[in-house]
Amino acid sequence: MADSTSETKGVKTLLGEPKKAIIRLAVPMIIAMSVQTVYNFVDALWVSGFGQDIFTSSPVLETGEGALAAIGLVLPFFMMAIAISTGLGVGGSSAISRRIGSDDKKGADNVAIHSIIIIVLVATVFSILFFTLAPWIFNSISSGVSAGMAISYGRVIFAFSIFIFFINIATAILRGEGDVKRAMYALIFGAGLNIVLDPVFIYTFRFGVTGAAYATMLSMGVTSVLLVYWLFFRKDTYVTFSFRDFKFKKDILKDFFRVGLPASVQQISMSITMLILNIVIVKLAMGGDNGLAVYSTGWRVVMLAVLPLLGLATAVVSVTGAAYGARRYDKLDTGFMYSIKFGLIVEVFIAVTIFVLAPFIAFVFSTGGSTSTFGADLETFIKISCLFYPGAALGIMSSAMFQGVGKGTYSLVATLLRTLVLTVFLSVILLRFFEPAILGIWWGLVIANLIGSAVSFTWGKLYIRKLYRENNLKV
C-alpha cells in the first residue's frame, strides 16, 4: 500500500462497513452529478432563449425551439461518447477495486495505465469518425432547420471529445481507489465553469447553440488539465503511473474488457435508443422539431431526477467489487440491498416533487420563443416520466452490482432488454393507440423501464443467492 493519507482513507472506506461505505462514496458523487445535471438544465435554458435580454440587445437566431431540437439530434452521439468512456471507466474502476480487495497494488497500477492508453486510442477513432460523418448523419434524420444547427454544434463536440473520454476514465480511476472527493471536485469545477461560459459564448459572442458546444468543451479541457495534474504530477493517489516500457498484458485486457466492454455497450444501447426514438418521433409520430425539443428537454429533467441513483451506482460498483474481491458476500448483499432501499425512498420523493413542479418547469423552458404547444407538451412528458423514477432504483443498482463483481455481461443483457427491446418495441406499438401518437412513445418509455428494472433486480438477487450456495453460506 502507498502511504498517502487520502489513499489510505479511500481504501479503508472500500473495505469497511458496507452501508457506511455506500454513503461515504455516494454522497460526493451525488453532489458532483447534481452540479453537472444543474449545468445541463441551465444549458438547455440558455439555448431555449431564456434570459438572453440580459446579455444582448438583439435576438440571437440560433436559439429557441429549433436549437433545442438540434441538441436533441446531437444528444445521442454526445451520450455515446459518455457511454463508451463511462463503460470503459466502469471496467477500470471495478478491476482496480477488486485488486484493492485482494491487496494487489501492482495489479491496480497496471489496470490504471491500461485504462488511460486504451481510452486515448478509442477517443481518437471516435472523433475522426463522427466529425467526418456529421453532415450525413443529421441531414438523414431531420430536414428541418435543426439539422444545420446540429451539424455545427455536433462537430465542435466531436472535435474535442478526447476531453469527454479522459475525464470519465480519470474520475473512474479515482473512484476505483475510493478517492471520490477529488472526482467530485473535478466534476463540480467543470460544470460550474460551463455554467459561467454558456451565456458568454451563446449571447455575448453571438454563437448561438454552437456557442454552447464551445463552452462545454472548453470547460472540459480545463477540467482535464486539473485531472492530469492530480494523476501524473502530484503523485499522491493510490495507483501510480509509469509508462516506460509499457506493454499490453492479456490478462489485464481480458479483465478490463470483461466488465468495460459490456458496460460500454450497455451505455451505448441507451444512446442508440435515444437515436431510434428521435427517428420514431420525426418519421412515425410526426412530432417534428417540437417533438424532438420536448424529448430532448424532458430527458434532461429525467436525468436530474435519477442523478442520486447514478451517484449511488458509482459507490455500489466500488463497494461490491471490493467485497467480491475479499470474498465477503455478506457485505456485498448488504451494500446492494441498502442502496436499493435508499434509492427507492429518494426517488419517490423526487417523483412527487417534479410532478407538482411540472407546470412551472415547462413554463420556464417555453419563454424563449417556442411554439404555443411546446410548454403543454413538455409538461405532459414530465408528468408521465415521473412514474418510473422509483422503479429505476431496482435496475440501476442491480446493473452496478453486476459490474462491481465482474459480471458485466449480465448487466448488459438486462439493459438491452429494457432499452433496445422493450422501449423501442413498446413505443412503436403504443403510438398507434394514442392521439397524439407521440404520447404512446412516452408511455412506452415508462412501461419498458419498469419491466426492465424488475427483471434486473430479480436476476441480481438470484445471483447473490447463488454465491451463498456455492460457498456454503446461509442466505
Image (spheres, grey):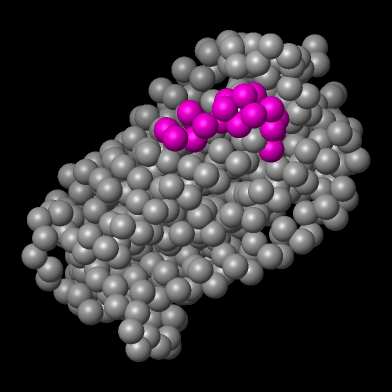
Residue 398: within the magenta? no
Coordinates of residue 321 in the picture (x, y in percent): 30, 63
Residue under the image location 69 percent in, 38 percent down: 210
Picture quadrant where residue 323 is located: bottom left
Position of residue 432 relative to residue 261, above or below, is above
Q: Name the residue: 46% across, 59% down.
A: 166
Q: Is residue 170 left or right of residue 446?
A: left
Which residue occupies 64% across, 11% down? 53
Q: Which residues are magenta?
A: 192-210
111 or 391: nearer the viewer: 111
Q: Is residue 459 left or right of residue 2?
A: right
Horizontal side of residue 19 vs 152, given as left or right: left
Overall secondary structure of the magenta section: helix
* Quadrant placement of the N terminus: bottom left
Identify the residue at horizontal 48%, vertical 28% (top origin): 196
Q: Nearer the viewer, residue 283 or 41?
A: 41
In this view, 388 is above or below 230: above
Position in image of residue 136 (x %, y %): 85, 55
**How many numbered markers are drawn?**
0
From the viewer's perspective, is 220 left or right of 16? right
Q: Position of residue 421 (x, y in %)?
A: 69, 54
Residue 105 appears anywhere in the view = yes
156 to 295, vertically: above or below: below
Magenta region includes residue 206: yes
Q: Position of residue 425 (x, y in %)?
A: 75, 48
Residue 337 in sight in this render: no
The C terminus is located in which quarter?
A: bottom left
Instruction: Return the residue nearer the eye: 151 or 415.
Output: 151
